[in-house]
Amino acid sequence: MTVHPVPDKDPEEWTTGEEPMTGPQASYLHTLAQEAGVDVPDQLSKADASRLIDELQDRTGRGN
């Protein structure tokens, strides 16, 4: 099981939050989206990807 650290700051406060999501974020996000049966927008910022990962972790039970 992969453990992802909880960010210290809200994604809105990240100085790099508006940069494009990282490769690892995209990969994990697509895995979660497939499990949840949802589509992922192609162009997400790091902050938006983080929020969507949190939401999909809750939806799929991977966040527990």
Image: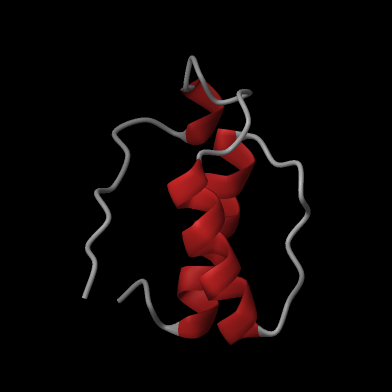
In front here: 19 or 53? 19
Q: Residue at x 51, y 19 (%)?
A: 16
Where is the N terminus found, in terms of image quarters?
Answer: bottom left
Q: How many marks?
A: 0
Q: Is residue 13 above or below residue 46?
A: above
Rendering coords of residue 41 (x, y %): 78, 54
- Left or right: 54 as drawn, with respect to 1: right
Q: Residue at x 45, y 34 (%)?
A: 10
- Left or right: 41 as drawn, with respect to 58: right
- Left or right: 35 as drawn, with respect to 57: right
The colour scheme applied to this rendered structure is secondary structure
Rendering coords of residue 19 (x, y %): 60, 24
In front here: 55 or 24? 24
Q: Is residue 50 above or below residue 21?
A: below
Q: Is residue 2 above or below residue 13?
A: below
In front here: 59 or 35? 35
Rendering coords of residue 46 (x, y %): 56, 35
Q: Residue at x 55, y 61 (%)?
A: 29
Q: Residue at x 77, y 70 (%)?
A: 39
Where is the C terminus found, in terms of image quarters?
Answer: bottom left
Can you name the residue that lies furthest to the top here? Answer: 15
Rendering coords of residue 28 (x, y %): 47, 62
